[in-house]
Image (tube, grey):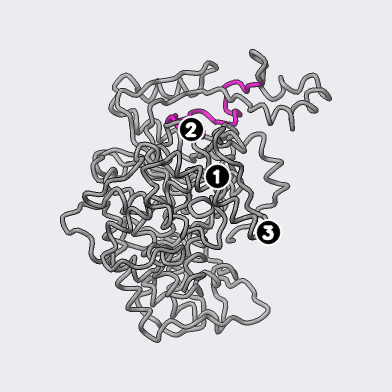
Amino acid sequence: MRTFYSFTVILGLSFFVFSFNRIDNKNLYKKTSNTPALHTNSKDSESDNVKKENISNDFFKRYSDLKKYKSDVMSLYKNRSLGSIWYDEDEINEFGSILYEKAKKTNDLVIPYQKEIDQLFDMSSENNLSKTDADMLLSSLYVVYTKKSNSDKKKLSYDAMLKDFLNYSTIEEASAKHDENEVLYDQYYKLEDVLKKYKKLEKSSKWKPIVTEMPYKELRPDAVSSTIAQVRTRLYLLGDLKQDSKSDFYDRELMDAVMKYKVRNGFKPNYILAEEHIKEMNIPVSDKVKTLMLNMERIRAISPQLVNNDEFVLVNVPSFELIYVKNGKIELTSSVFVGSPLTKTTIFNGEIDRIVFSPYWTVPQSIVQNELRSKIAADPNYLAEKNMEIVNGQVRQKPGPGNSLGLVKFMFPNADDIYMHDTPSKTLFDFEKRTFSHGCINVKMAKELAAAMLKDYPEWTQEKIDKAMAGKVENSFKLSKKVPIYITYFTSLVNENGEIGFFQDVYEKDADLTEKSLTVN
């Protein structure tokens, strides 16, 4: 973790900072009445097998077109509990998303119950499937996909499936053999070029661990240390330094290289070399190679949409950054902070259809009950002091500079009620690990983003925008042209200068896939 932020401090800031509109503990997959209850912790293996059999019989009775795949599907769950392959808690994992994208791109593949499967990945669609049904549908999709694409008829099993999807040589081969006529988001090709350099570096003997003096002390300009010489060599290999003088003195040349390294990797831009920075530099180059290939696969999944749009907003969670592209060029870049690991920002695509100036903030009932009720009871002036009021039984914060949503918010319909907004707590953008919200995206340059998006609307002059943001009444404007928004999870990206950045795996999505891969190798 690059930056540690006290949980108690976060709680103290929460009332004015967090976006609470995401419904906590939301059950995205409602159990249907005809689906048997699932127990995954039975110690009696025989009893567990009976339950599996009952559940599978019920499933294949209701999804009769899949009966012929029953044996293959259930082989995936051998020595495993049902409902645990394609999900991380209540969300389909990246493993499941990769399967879905691969299946959709397979020519002439007939997908049984495609409507139900599509709904699992459609944020705007109401889905009433139980998690067990959804997981078994995806397992069935895997079997159908494999039988279509598996020319050498490898044995179907959970381990074989993991190797098929997560073995990095397989991913590399798939990347190298992509259709030359397929148009991909340009990040794919940029990462491909970086991958070649890192694989070459991996094969060389130049990448050696940096050995530090103990106990470690932060290194600053003008310091003299054997660690400095090793850092210099590392930054030379990474391209941040043009030459390696081997000097152990922290000079101006190294200062510039350290700043370059920090900026492209999302660290706080200063010249301090803390232990966490050395730890980051010591990540094996083989791990960097895996990260690059994994993110190339992620890009393949979203490239068709991005390529076809000359205007869009892209929010990348691991780099805590937003970019707004207009007429095919980057119009604006802004820092953001996102959901905490307990209230993750959902990764999905949507369309911004409204910009709301001087917004109200309706406080979720859970916050009212858990935090506000006692404060209101203790202080009759509490609501007035916080610029709040009660309307139709709900507590809401009035528009103004102290509003938790700031001066403007950007709406894009989605099942989790996530949106982007301004924030009065600008100091939080100084942190390297910015996971402070309850799911919504807090934008540092929200005012500038609104102005940039309204350039095609002549009636929205800068004066009118400023007046709308300074108002005491909420002002909602519906865009005549919806703006696509992509909330992504890329742990490596290439910037405009052609420099690679590796970012924090804040939701441990890379780690989860890597761990699964290691368990079968």
Q: Nearer the viewer, residue 110 or 380?
A: 110
Quadrant of res 279: bottom right
Name of the residue lying farthest toward the left: 181
Name which residue type carries label 1: Asp
Query: Who comes first in sequence, dot 1 or dot 3?
Result: 3
The label on residue 44 is 3
Label 2 secondary element: loop
Q: In this view, does 247 lie to the left or right of 153?
A: right
Name which residue type carries label 3: Asp
Q: Where is residue 161 in the image (x, y as percent from the top left)?
A: 41, 63
Q: Where is residue 414 in the image (x, y as percent from the top left)?
A: 45, 32
Residue appearing at x 48%, y 70% in the figure: 520
The label on residue 90 is 1
Query: Who comes first in sequence, dot 3 or dot 2?
Result: 3
Whether residue 130 is visible here, answered yes or no, is yes
Q: Where is residue 234 in the image (x, y as percent from the top left)?
A: 44, 77
Whether residue 18 is visible here, answered yes or no, is no
Is residue 309 part of the magenta span, yes or no? no
Label 3 secondary element: loop
Label 1 secondary element: loop
The residue to which callout 2 is attached is 415
